[in-house]
Amino acid sequence: MKVKASAKAISDVIARIKHDGYVAHLSEGADHTIIGVVGESATPLLEENYATMDGVENVMQLSVPYELASRHFHPGNSLVPLNGSQMGGNKVLVIAGPCSVESREQIIETACAVKEAGATALRGGAFKPRTSPYSFQGHGEKGLQWLAEAREVTGLPVVTEVMDPALVPLVCQYADVLQIGARNMQNFTLLNAAGESQHTILLKRGMSNTVEDLLMSAEYILAQGNRRVMLCERGIRTFEKATRNTFDLNAIPVLKSLTHLPVIADPSHAVGLWEYVEAISRGAVAAGADGLIIEVHPRPDEALSDGRQSLKPERFKSLMEQVRRVAEAVGRTA
């Protein structure tokens, strides 16, 4: 739309889009208002039908399939509120906590430790997707209740995974951010349900998925009108066996150029070995990551899942100091 397009002109275009059987998505920036047109309809989508409408400056066909996630639709960075800060802004935010919620005492102890070190939010799995059906699967709703109690004690918002569309309403009762894990990145029914919830979503890249696959999955959530989406690079599967996965550092600047959505990194899952987590964290921040999600456990040797990649609280405190220094070196804060 033109810079000085009136509210009536904008509403008239949106009304025409809906009349033609499509869905309109409004993006209002400092200089321009952009109206995205998505969906399918029996009515042909003709540029000339809109180009002559009052207030319209230009009509264009996007060259990417992920329209709503694209910077063509939303040129500026999207900011996702999180604990008084904004993921996607100048400050690098850190989400931290154990892989699994193992007990009330464990999650509260960890929450207090990461809060003291400067974490923005608490992570912890109440429902755990595991490679083996015999591995610990999480405590379910009881784990969610312990997470909520940890939030009451520390004030940290809760990030936890949801694995089933039917569980979205339950997890929303307890969590501030719904995490969709790597194994569920293309569970489209779950993506739609998460989008409909209007909860903040943390979407992890699948271990064998491309950057475009990740953006297309984000598109499912955005198409439900939910703009609070954060993307996460957590390592991909390659031939290399020295680490759990191969951290795709390239993905961070590539995603930042293609999408307006915040991009965070998961060094813990990327390498699977705690001794390398700090180095990968530094690299991710230097490459432009908006945030990190780090696994922290007070006694990793006793962890029921992913203890090998979890930092002890004192190591996490050291990591936070390193992140601050790197952020400052690239003109940001942490």
Image: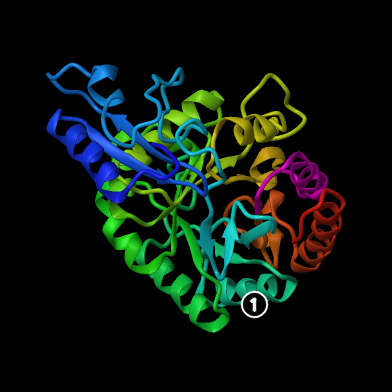
Number of numbered discs visible in the structure rendering: 1
Q: Quadrant of the C terminus?
A: bottom right
Q: Position of residue 253 (x, y in %)?
A: 69, 33
The quadrant where residue 210 appears: top right
Q: Position of residue 158 (x, y in %)?
A: 49, 66
Q: Is residue 209 visible?
A: no
User: Which residue is nearer to you in this view: 135 or 180?
Assistant: 180
Q: Check the image and report above or below for 48 versus 220.
A: above
Residue position for label 1: 112
User: Which residue is nearer to you in this view: 62 or 282?
Assistant: 62
Q: Check the image and report above or below for 44 versus 286.
A: above
Q: Is residue 267 left or right of residue 22?
A: right
Residue 222 lies in the magenta stretch: no
> Which region shows up in magenta?
273-293
Q: Amino acid at mark 1?
A: Cys
> Which residue is at 74% across, 71% downward?
117
> Which residue is at 25% across, 48% downward?
8
Q: Quadrant of the N terminus?
A: top left
User: Which residue is nearer to you in this view: 268 or 281?
Assistant: 281
Q: Check the image and report above or below for 241 versus 274.
A: above
Q: Is residue 121 left or right of residue 118?
A: left
Q: Position of residue 149 (x, y in %)?
A: 46, 79
Residue 285 lies in the magenta stretch: yes
> Which residue is at 56% across, 70% downward?
84
> Which residue is at 57% across, 45% downward?
77
Give the class, few, some or many, for how many residues have Cα within 10 Å of label 1's Cα (few <14, many ≥20): many
Q: Position of residue 206 (x, y in %)?
A: 51, 32
Prevailing SS of the magenta stretch? helix
Q: Is residue 317 visible?
A: yes
